[in-house]
């Protein structure tokens, strides 16, 4: 599986490069979501949103603008029908079709609601579960954001370390 790690913050992409420098299946990209999507071929994108599937800020907003509001409605409906109380557990992941596209979406909340993330282990859980769902669904190329890098305010080095740790654990299994 080809993995693109995407963020527009060079502090984050620089930290990723320090950890993933020797990973041939990982490409680190400093770019905006729309520009990336217009110039790369992937069959899956990852939403690092919140447990309710509200996709109105940061990276999620870029996904919504690119694919349309029907995607947000689909994610929120799935969460409401699938998870007790209408909240997807933080760090869990599910895959769904994107309306009007051949591309799939993996939704993996980094937080219950918009807030600072104080435990970087959440980043590890998110990365691992996204990779597992992608593999189980035979994803060939995926774009993954910096889990907790914006609203969560996770330090870029901590974020990169946790994502790399999950990647290594996943590769070894």
Image (cartoon, rainbow, N blue to C red):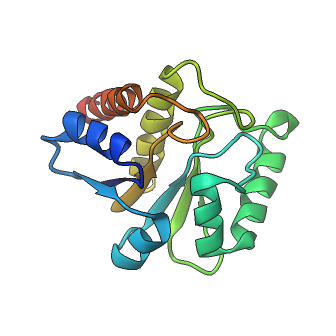
**In the displayed structure image, the side of residue 130 where residue 166 appears, left or right:** left
Q: Residue at x 48, y 46 (%)?
A: 133
**In the displayed structure image, the side of residue 20 where residue 108 appears, left or right:** right
Considering every residue shown, the one lying at the far right of the view is 85
* Foreground residue among 109 and 35: 35
Q: Residue at x 47, y 43 (%)?
A: 130
| Residue 1 seen in render | no
Q: Residue at x 50, y 35 (%)?
A: 126
Considering every residue shown, the one lying at the far top of the view is 119
- Position of residue 45 relative to residue 158, above or below, is below
Residue 35, percent from left and from top? 42, 73
- Position of residue 137 relative to residue 91, above or below, is below
**In the displayed structure image, the side of residue 101 where residue 3 appears, left or right:** left
- Position of residue 40 relative to residue 121, above or below, is below
- Position of residue 77 relative to residue 158, above or below, is below
How many numbered badges does the structure rendering display? 0
Residue 123, percent from left and from top? 48, 30
| Residue 4 seen in render | yes
**In the displayed structure image, the side of residue 78 where residue 7 appears, left or right:** left
Q: Residue at x 41, y 78 (%)?
A: 38
Residue 114, percent from left and from top? 72, 37
Residue 37, percent from left and from top? 43, 72
């Amino acid at each position: 599986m080809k993995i693109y790690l995407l963020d527009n913050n060079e502090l984050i992409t620089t930290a990723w490069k320090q950890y993933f420098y020797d990973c041939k299946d990982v490409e680190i990209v400093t770019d905006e979501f729309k520009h990336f999507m217009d110039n790369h071929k992937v069959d899956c994108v990852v939403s690092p949103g919140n447990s309710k599937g509200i996709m109105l800020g940061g990276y999620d907003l870029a996904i919504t603008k690119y694919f349309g509001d029907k995607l947000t409605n689909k994610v929120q409906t799935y969460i409401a029908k699938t998870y007790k109380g209408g909240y997807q557990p933080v760090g869990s992941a599910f895959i769904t079709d994107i309306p009007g596209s051949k591309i799939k979406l993996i939704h993996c909340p980094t937080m219950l609601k918009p807030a600072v993330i104080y435990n970087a282990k959440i980043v590890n859980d998110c990365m691992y579960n996204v990779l597992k769902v992608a593999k189980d669904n035979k994803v060939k190329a995926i774009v993954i954001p910096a889990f907790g890098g914006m609203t969560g305010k996770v330090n870029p080095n901590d974020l990169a370390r946790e994502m790399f740790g999950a990647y290594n654990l996943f590769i070894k299994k």
